[in-house]
Image (cartoon, helix red, strand yellow):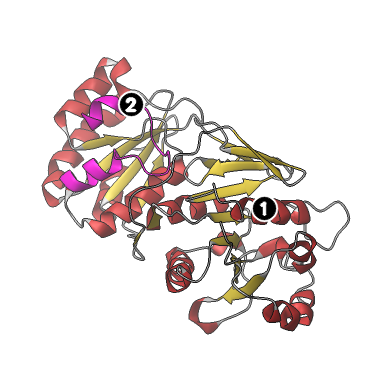
C-alpha cells in the first residue's frame, strides 16, 4: 500500500510529562515533513520522543488535543468522557487524510480509553493504536521509545486495522487490554483473548489471521455517564442498591466467582428491580475474577434472577469493555433496553466470545 502517512496526535492527557521542549524544538522540522503521516495523539511519559519517529523513517504530523482550550497536560487518571469525544472528533476530522493514528496516553486509564475508542470508532480499516510508557522518555531505562517505535511500526503495516493497544511488544485488541502491573514494563495483558501480534526488532509476528474489515467505518462521539459500578464485598449493605438505582440508569454489579447475588441482598434486589425496571433501568452482572468470566447459570439462584428480571451478563468481557460498551449503547439507544441488550451481545473488536445463548 502506498502510505499516505501516519498521524501522531497528542492529547493533553497523562502524567510525568518528560522534556516537552523537545517536541516544540523539533516541531517545525517535523511539520515540514508531514507529507501525510500517522497521526499521533500523545500524552504522558512519551511526549519527548520525536527522535523515535525519525529513527524508523516515518513522516508524521504532531497534534496536541486539549479540553476547554487548556493545553496543560493532565494526569491520565483525570480522563473523562469529553476527552474521548475530543480524540474521536480529531480522528473523524482527519480520517481521510491519513492511513493510521497513534494515540499517546497515560497508563492509568489507557485500558478504558482503548475500549471506549473501540466502540466510538468501529470497523476502521485504518489502525488506531494506543500506547504509553511506565517511565518518562528522558530517563535511563525508559520503555517509552520502544513502545512508541513499535506502535508506529504496527500503524504503518497494511494488515493492521481497528483499535489496538501496543505495549511491551504486545499488540492487544482495544477491548481486551487490562493494566495488570503498576510499575513493570509488561503492564498490560490481553484478558480472555490471545494477543493479536508481537513486535520484535521492528518485525510484526501475527497470531490472529488477518480478516479484512468489509463494513464501512462508524463513528459515534457521544457516550452516557448514567452508569456506575457496585463492587460486592462480604457484608455489602442492601440499601446501597436503592441509592444507586435512584441516581443511575445502569448498575454494573461486580460479584464473586462466576457471578450471582448473595442471599442477604436478594430480597432487596427483587424489590428494587421491580420498582425500577419499568423505568428502563437495568443491571449488568460481572465478576471480580479477571480471567475466564462469569456464568450465572451454574447456580440455581443465578438462573432464577436472570429469568425474572432485565439483566445482562458480561461473561468473558473485561470490566473496562463492559463499562464503555454500555456508555456507548446507552447514548445510542436511550432507555431502549431491548436494543441495548442486543447491542451488548453483538461482538465488537473481539470483545465478547462466550454469550452463545444470548446471541441466538
**Residue 235 x/y as whole percent:** 41, 31
Q: Residue at x 63, y 58 (%)?
A: 106
Residue at (73, 45) in percent of width and height: 183
The disc, 2 or 1, on the residue closer to the chain's N-terminal end is: 1
Quadrant in the picture for the C terminus: top left
User: Residue 245, relative to residue 223: is it above or below?
Assistant: above
The magenta region covers 338-360
Compared across the picture, whether 53 is left or right of 11 comes to right
Is the residue marked by circle 1 packed among few (<14), some (14-19), or many (20+) residues within 10 Å?
A: many
Instruction: Answer with the quarter of the image where residue 62 lies.
Output: bottom right
Q: In this view, does 21 lie above or below 126?
A: below
Q: Is residue 254 visible?
A: yes
Q: Is mark 2 on a helix, strand or loop?
A: loop
* Residue 250 magenta: no
Horizontal side of residue 323 vs 32, given as left or right? left
Q: Quadrant of residue 316?
A: top left
Q: Which of 100 and 178 is in front in this view?
A: 100
Compared to residue 238, the image places residue 159 above or below, namely below
Front-lying residue, 308 or 41: 41
Position in image of residue 121 (x %, y %): 40, 57
Residue at label 2? 260
Please name the residue that numbered disc 1 is placed on. Answer: 153
Q: What element carries label 1?
A: helix
Query: Farthest left residue?
Result: 278
Amino acid at each position: 500500500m502506498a502510505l499516505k502517512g501516519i498521524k501522531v496526535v497528542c492529547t493533553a492527557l497523562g502524567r510525568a510529562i518528560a522534556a516537552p521542549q523537545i517536541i516544540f524544538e523539533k516541531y517545525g522540522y517535523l511539520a515540514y515533513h508531514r507529507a501525510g503521516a500517522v497521526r499521533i495523539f500523545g500524552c504522558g511519559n512519551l511526549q519527548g520522543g520525536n527522535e523515535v519517529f525519525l529513527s524508523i523513517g516515518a513522516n508524521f504530523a504532531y497534534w496536541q488535543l486539549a479540553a476547554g482550550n487548556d493545553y496543560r497536560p493532565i494526569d491520565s487518571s483525570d480522563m473523562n468522557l469529553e476527552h474521548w469525544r475530543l480524540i474521536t472528533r480529531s480522528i473523524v476530522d482527519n480520517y481521510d487524510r491519513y492511513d493510521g493514528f497513534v494515540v499517546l496516553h497515560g497508563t492509568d486509564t489507557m485500558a478504558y480509553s482503548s475500549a471506549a475508542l473501540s466502540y466510538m470508532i468501529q470497523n476502521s480499516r485504518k489502525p488506531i493504536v494506543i500506547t504509553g510508557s511506565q517511565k518518562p522518555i528522558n530517563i535511563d531505562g525508559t520503555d517509552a521509545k520502544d513502545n512508541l517505535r513499535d506502535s508506529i511500526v504496527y500503524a504503518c503495516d497494511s494488515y493492521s486495522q481497528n483499535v489496538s493497544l501496543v505495549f511491551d511488544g504486545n499488540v492487544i485488541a482495544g477491548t481486551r487490554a487490562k493494566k495488570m502491573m503498576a510499575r513493570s514494563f509488561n503492564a498490560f495483558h490481553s484478558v480472555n483473548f490471545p494477543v493479536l501480534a508481537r513486535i520484535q526488532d521492528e518485525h510484526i509476528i501475527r497470531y490472529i489471521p488477518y480478516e479484512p474489515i468489509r463494513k464501512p467505518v462508524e463513528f459515534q462521539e457521544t457516550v452516557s455517564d448514567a452508569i456506575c459500578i457496585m463492587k460486592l464485598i462480604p457484608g455489602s449493605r442492601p440499601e446501597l442498591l436503592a441509592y444507586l438505582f435512584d441516581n443511575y440508569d445502569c448498575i454494573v454489579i461486580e460479584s464473586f466467582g462466576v457471578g450471582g447475588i448473595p442471599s442477604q441482598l436478594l430480597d432487596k434486589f427483587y424489590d428494587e428491580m421491580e420498582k425500577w425496571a419499568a423505568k428502563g433501568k437495568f443491571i449488568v452482572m460481572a465478576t471480580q475474577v479477571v480471567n475466564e468470566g462469569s456464568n450465572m447459570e451454574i447456580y440455581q439462584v443465578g438462573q432464577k434472577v436472570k429469568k425474572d428480571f432485565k439483566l445482562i451478563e458480561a461473561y468473558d468481557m473485561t470490566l473496562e469493555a463492559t463499562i464503555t460498551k454500555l456508555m456507548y449503547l446507552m447514548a445510542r439507544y436511550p432507555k431502549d433496553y431491548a436494543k441495548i441488550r442486543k447491542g451488548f451481545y453483538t461482538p465488537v473488536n473481539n470483545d465478547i466470545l462466550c454469550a452463545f445463548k444470548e446471541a441466538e
